[in-house]
Every structure is written in C-alpha cells, then in structure tokens.
Amino acid sequence: MRRAWLIILILYAPNLSLASADSLFISRLNSKAYKYFYINPDTSIFLANQAIVLAEKGGYKYLPAYSYYVLSKAHWAKANYLLSIHYGFKALKIYEKLK
C-alpha cells in the first residue's frame, strides 16, 4: 500500500525542476525529443512542446528555435507535411533573427 502511494505521488506531483528550468535541462529535453522523432513522433512532439514553453518562459532565444526544428522533423515523420513546413519555417525565422 505504501508503494502505491509513492508511485502516485511521483506520477502526479508537479515536477519542481520545471518551475525554474535552466538551459541545460531544456537542452536535454530537446535532445530526448530529437532522439524519439522517428521512433515515436508523439513523444517527440510532447517533449519539444514542453521545451518550447520552458525556453520561452526562461527567455532563451536559441532553444525554442531548436525545439521548433524538432517539431518539424516529428511532424514529417508522422507524414503531416503542412505542420512540418510550418514549424520548419518558424525555426528558420528565429535562426535568421539570431544572426
């Protein structure tokens, strides 16, 4: 019974590291998202969206662009080419502004 409560607490408790995410955490999230874009695109989309939210909340400029790039690849893997192009161009616009 005690293990069940521990599992419930771990699964449903808010992740404290998400409240103040640093660039390394977001970068690792993006790396995981990129790793899964071809194997499991839905997981990749979920992770990339989390990274975008955290990167924009933290005020990072490069990290959301990479997240959009990963979203583009994940939607390409799902054969949703319209969203793939949309996110690809979104990433490209951010990269152009950074130069």
Image: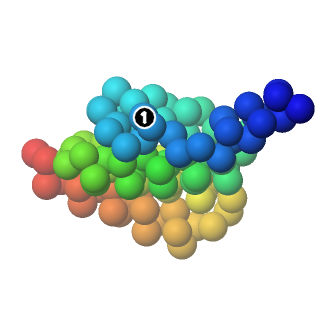
Position of 78 with respect to 63 (left or right) is right
Q: Establish if 32 lies above or below 64.
A: above
Across the whole image, how many numbered discs are drawn on residues?
Answer: 1
Q: Quadrant of the C terminus?
A: top left
Q: Neighbour class for label 1 at 10 Å: few (<14), some, many (≥20)?
A: few
Residue shown at 82%/28% (left/top)?
Answer: 2
Q: Quadrant of the N terminus?
A: top right
User: Residue extending furthest left?
Assistant: 99
User: Residue extending furthest right?
Assistant: 1
Q: Residue 85 or 28: which is nearer the viewer?
A: 28
Residue 61 screen position, x and y as percent? 20, 47
Residue 85 screen position, x and y as percent? 46, 65
Residue shown at 68%/62% (left/top)?
Answer: 79
Q: Establish if 84 lies above or below 26.
A: below
Q: Secondary structure at mark 1?
A: helix
Residue shown at 13%/47% (left/top)?
Answer: 98
Position of 8 with respect to 49 (left or right) is right
Q: Quadrant of residue 40?
A: top right
User: Residue extending furthest front?
Assistant: 2
Q: Residue 89 or 44: which is nearer the viewer?
A: 44
Residue 73 screen position, x and y as percent? 54, 50
Residue 66 visible somewhere in the drawing:
no
Residue 32 visible somewhere in the drawing:
yes
Residue shown at 69%/59% (left/top)?
Answer: 78
Q: Residue 58 or 86: which is nearer the viewer?
A: 58
Residue 81 screen position, x and y as percent? 58, 67
Position of 78 with respect to 92 (left or right) is right
User: Residue extending furthest bottom?
Assistant: 82
Mark 1, residue position: 17
